[in-house]
Image (spheres, rainbow, N blue to C red):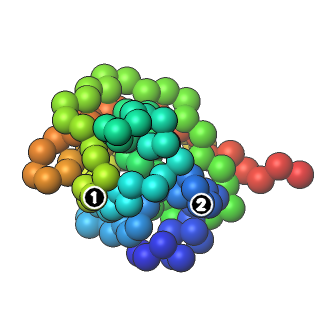
Amino acid sequence: MNREEIKQLLPHREPMLLLDEVNVEGEKAVGKYTVRGDEFFLQGHFPGNPIVPGVIHCEMIAQTAVALLPDSKGKTPLYTGLNNVKFKNPLLPGDTAVMTVELTARRGIFCFAKGRLEANGKLCTSAEFSFALLPPRA
């Protein structure tokens, strides 16, 4: 899926759409995002030494998960939990983040997943998380 196709599933828009492409490979989704260096979250994190904040890593991983849920169209995915998050290496301007995510369970509107973000062949972040797919507000 390219960016325009991703927008058909995700309600996120610039500057919070953090996927350039995503592909479903069997039970896994693999997303990619190239850090340009002009993103809002780099402006003060850190001047002269920009590093993508860890919370943004988690958001990239979670956005990738929604590609595994074709019924997510028109719904709002909201985090309900984040567990066992580990940050191993930084993500820097010019890096291409590669997120690999798989669903581990689903109960109604609640989804459970685990994922990882790598760049330059190194693990940056791994996490287990859950989110709810909320219907549109009336």
Tell me the amino acid under the disc marked 1.
Answer: Gly
Q: Which mark is residue 14?
A: 2
Q: Are marks 1 and 2 in contact (CB under 8 Å)?
A: no
Which quadrant holds residue 78?
A: top right
Of the image marks 1 and 2, the number of the one nearer the N terminus: 2
- The secondary structure type at the circle numbered 2 is loop
State the CA–CA distance, disc 1 to disc 2.
19 Å
Asked if residue 74 is positioned above or below residue 56 in the image, the reply reads below
Q: Which mark is residue 94?
A: 1
Q: Which of 56/68 is in front?
A: 56
User: Is the residue marked by circle 1 packed among few (<14), some (14-19), or many (20+) residues within 10 Å?
Assistant: few
Tell me the amino acid under the disc marked 2.
Answer: Glu
Which quadrant holds residue 85?
A: top left
Image quadrant containing the N terminus? bottom left
> Seen in the image, is 70 located left or right of residue 123?
right
User: Is the residue marked by circle 2 packed among few (<14), some (14-19), or many (20+) residues within 10 Å?
Assistant: few
For the residues carrying marks 1 and 2, which lies nearer the camera in this image?
Answer: 1
Residue at 14% across / 53% down in the picture? 120
Q: Which residue ends up furthest to the right in the rendered image?
A: 138
Residue at 48% across / 72% down in the picture? 3
In this rendering, does residue 68 appear at all?
A: no
